[in-house]
Image: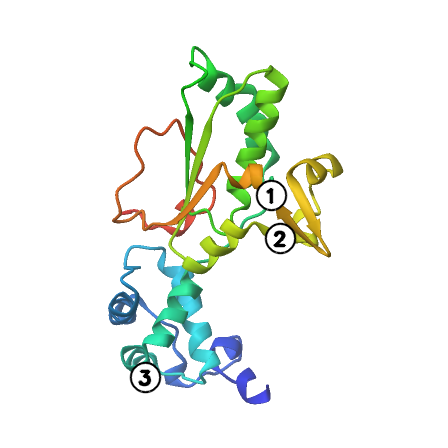
Amino acid sequence: LVSLSYHPYLARSAPALPAEAATVVDADLNPIFSAVRTATGVDFTYYKHNTLRRRIERRMAMHDIADIREYTRRLRHDPAEAKTLAQEFLINVTSFFREPGISESLRETVLPALIEGRAPDDQIRVWIPGCSTGEEAYTLAINLMEFFEARGVAFGVQIFATDLSDSVIERARAGFYPENAVAGLSEERLKRFFIKRDRVYQVNQSLRNLCVFAKQDVTKDPPFSKIDLISCCNLLIYLGPIL
């Protein structure tokens, strides 16, 4: 721990740093993106660089590497490290009913317009790019179910939720969440939409049936078609202007 504390990533606030402790700059990034692209097929070139730099520096610290060129060589010869770095780039920050104002806007403005004049057999199709571990998708599904019930209507619903990360897609698909993840939900919602298993809650089957989770790279894969609503709360802040 003492040795790690002297690494440039953690010791940057110290009065004097050796020359090799310089932070990662734009010129250093392209070879890293190239190595990650070779290992994973994902191109991070036009993501926000400030966020990616911090992740690169963190991985360098974990390997006790201070020279960016040395770390780049490590990535080229170690696909496992390149894949780990790619996972570090994919910041998964989400929660149930993360922004109450969004749910209110859905109920008051968006959903009433969405069902106006719609035939009962006309399925409502929703797409959530950058869905992370699924909380956003299930939140939207709950909003839809509660809105339909309040209005006394019934429509078919298909929610396509996509992400770059296989691991978060698997977690979203399973729908298991620890107690702290659902702490903000009312008892009524927990009883209606979740099944408690020891200290873990699982989204019930009826709600999971509304959601299709799939891997997708929105920077190059085609979008879903005939979509009525797109919810994108976790993705755009990480993309650069070109994307």
Tell me how far mark 1 sits from mark 2, CA to CA.
10 Å
Tell me how far mark 3 sits from mark 1, CA to CA.
41 Å
Residue at x 56%, y 37% (from the top left corner) = 207
Residue 64, placed above or below residue 83: below
Tell me how far mark 2 sits from mark 3, CA to CA.
39 Å
Asked which quadrant contains residue 47, the reply is bottom left
Compared across the picture, whether 90 is left or right of 186 comes to: left
**Tag 2's secondary structure?**
strand
Q: Is residue 93 visible?
A: no
Residue at x 27%, y 78% (from the top left corner) = 76
> Which mark sits nearer the N-terminus, 3 or 1?
3
Residue positioned most to the top: 117
**Tag 3's secondary structure?**
helix
Residue at x 60%, y 39% (from the top left corner) = 97
Identify which residue, 200 or 114, lies in the foreground.
200
Residue 70, disc:
3
| Circle 2/circle 3 CB separation < 8 Å | no
Which residue type does callout 3 highlight? Glu
Q: Is residue 200 visible?
A: yes
| Circle 1/circle 2 CB separation < 8 Å | yes
Residue at x 67%, y 45% (from the top left corner) = 195
Compared across the picture, whether 93 is left or right of 192 comes to: left
Badge 3, how many Cα within 10 Å: few under 14, some, many 20+? few
The residue to which callout 2 is attached is 177
Residue 110, disc:
none
State the image coordinates of residue 54 (x, y, percent, origin top left).
44, 67
